[in-house]
Amino acid sequence: MRVFITGTAGFIGFHLARLLLEEGHVVHGYDGLTDYYDVNLKRRRHAILSEYPGFTATEAMLEDAPALESAVRAAQPEVIVHLAAQAGVRYSLENPRAYIDANLVGTANLLEIARALQPRHLLMASTSSVYGANTDMPFVESQKTDTPLTLYAATKKANEAMAHAYAHIHGVPTTMFRFFTVYGPWGRPDMALFKFTKGILEGTPIDIYNHGDMYRDFTYVADLVRAIRLLIDVPPPPLDQRDQPIEGDTLSPAAPWRVVNIGNSNQVRLLDFIEAIEAELGKKAIRNYLPMQTGDVPATWADCTLLLRLTGYRPQTPVHEGVIKFVQWYLEYFGVERNRS
Ligand SMILES: NC(=O)c1ccc[n+]([C@@H]2O[C@H](COP(=O)([O-])OP(=O)(O)OC[C@H]3O[C@@H](n4cnc5c(N)ncnc54)[C@H](O)[C@@H]3O)[C@@H](O)[C@H]2O)c1
């Protein structure tokens, strides 16, 4: 199968591309290698993918519509997975423009090309952040998501709506994913696990928001991309081919479109997460307890029943196992000696 993936120099796109290449598929990656975080890490990810004969890539921005169009046309993909975005909840307070450009303009450009090329399935990243101020746990896809707390969440909610309108008018089967706090090797330097590991190793204080009273549904990246891989083979059916309804399906009555949570279906206390990192590093963190950050939520928790019904699969790597794998990667990547004193 020929797959076009945006965001292949990014954390999740890299892992998904590698999984598909290992299976023998042909992948064209598209990434602007933005400097939101260390570009060397992005280059290293692309260098690894380039070792596979099935991988080619275009380095360009989503906002560059002609570049995006010519890359997709040349690749002639059967499947498009759109993961490139300005990610990060906190940075959207600092640089809102980046979210408008990448997530709204960039995604609109991608939808226009998908409309013209009509792949058999378009899959796009949304986020658990769209659940915003919801407090009913676990979060189920059918809940209202009308209370985003950051511009990041608002742009992702807009992406879900934009994709729905395109699926309605142009008929491209579209799956939206709501990812829950993804972590693992080759992870993002702006995310908690990376920052905590770095801080503990360097002996600098780590910031712990809401005085540690935070809970997250941490999803191990290998589990997440396995779920994406399985969902690729389950495109939402057109309106006239829906004989076997699935309980709890989010299939739109007006379009071949659905939204699916991908999480670990498990709430982990942030302090337990930190203890798992400390245990693996053999060193205690210097903890800097802080109040809640603007736009942040105290808890997330995914109901992944729909994912299970659609694919027979549910992520389940326990957090301590995933943390061990991340720490092993981190030490090797940065050439750091483990301190077991
Ligand atoms: N990692 C998580 O926990 C998480 C949670 C929920 C949703 N998501 C979503 O999953 C997707 C992938 O996230 P990730 O963690 O791999 O992030 P990432 O930042 O590592 O990867 C995104 C990639 O997109 C590229 N990019 C950004 N803006 C671009 C633009 N305008 N044009 C071209 N390329 C651009 C970046 O260079 C980067 O390599 C994103 O859509 C993100 O919003 C991630």
Image (spheres, grey):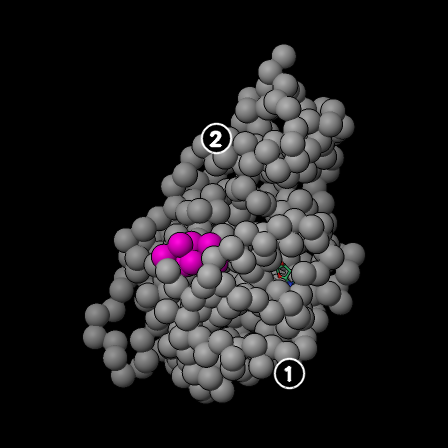
Which residue occupies the foreground of this view, 125 or 261? 125
**Residue 66: image tag:** 1
Q: Is residue 328 left or right of residue 235?
A: right
Which residue occupies the foreground of this view, 188 or 75? 75
Q: Residue at x 67, y 71 (%)?
A: 61
Q: Is residue 310 left or right of residue 298?
A: left
**Residue 172: image tag:** none
**Quadrant hosting residue 86:** bottom right
Q: Residue at x 63, y 19 (%)?
A: 339
Q: Position of residue 83 (x, y in %)?
A: 54, 63
Q: Residue at x 53, y 42 (%)?
A: 184
Secondary structure mainly formed by the magenta segment: helix
Residue furthest to the top in view is: 341
Mark 2 neighbour density, 10 Å: few (under 14) some (14–19) many (20 or more): some
**Quadrant hosting residue 152:** bottom right
Q: Position of residue 38 (x, y in %)?
A: 71, 50
Residue furthest to the right in view is: 94
Say which of marks 2 and 1 sits in front. 1
Depicted 225 relative to depicted 286: above or below: below
Q: Is residue 43 left or right of residue 110?
A: right
Q: Residue at x 77, y 60 (%)?
A: 95
**Residue 320: image tag:** 2
Which residue occupies the foreground of this view, 279 or 207? 279
If the image is split into quadrants, where does the C terminus sit?
top right
Q: Is ligand 1 less than 8 Å from the beta carbon at label 2?
A: no
Magenta stretch encompasses residue 166: no
**Quadrant hosting residue 109:** bottom right
Under mark 1, the amino acid is Pro
